[in-house]
Amino acid sequence: MYLDQAKKKEIFGQYGKSNTDTGSPEAQVALFSYRISHLTEHMKANRKDNNTKRSLVRLVGKRRALLNYLKDRDIERYRAIVKALGLRK
């Protein structure tokens, strides 16, 4: 499986406050970004997979909503996570 417990702990440890910090917006955005990149690669190979396409669009929307929330609450944390993940050009 592409996303196991060890990988989740690594992502939460790197972008969250600790390995068990699953609730912070930064940790959730990082996890969604990892899943989005995996699904994007899947869609390149399987372009007619509409269920995965729908899931990918929903994940992008969830990540966008979390980023908007973070931008409204604390612009510095928003800028830090966007820079760390390389979401903007």
Image (cartoon, rainbow, N blue to C red):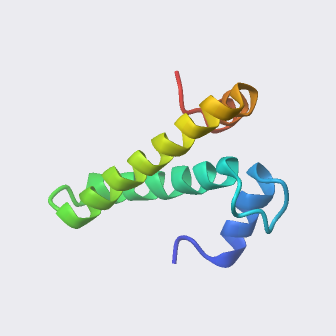
Q: Residue at x 84, y 54 (%)?
A: 17
Question: Which residue appears at 74% of the width and 68% of the height?
Answer: 9
In the displayed image of the protein, which residue is found farthest to the top?
89
Pick whichever, 21 or 5, lies toward us: 21
Q: Nearer the viewer, residue 43 or 78?
A: 78
Residue in front for this viewpoint, 88 or 28: 28
Q: Is residue 61 left or right of residue 83?
A: left
Identify the residue at image location x=71%, y=74%. Answer: 6
In the rendered view, tell whether residue 81 sits above or below residue 38.
above
| x 53%, y 49%: residue | 33
Position in image of residue 3 (x %, y %): 56, 71
Number of marks present in the image shown: 0
Q: Quadrant of residue 7?
A: bottom right
Residue farthest to the right, as pictured: 18
Residue 75: x, y in percent?
69, 26
Task: Residue at the far front: name it.
Answer: 73
**x and y percent of residue 37 in the render?**
46, 51
Question: Is 37 above or below relative to 68?
Answer: below
Would residue 28 be found to the left or right of residue 52 on screen? Answer: right
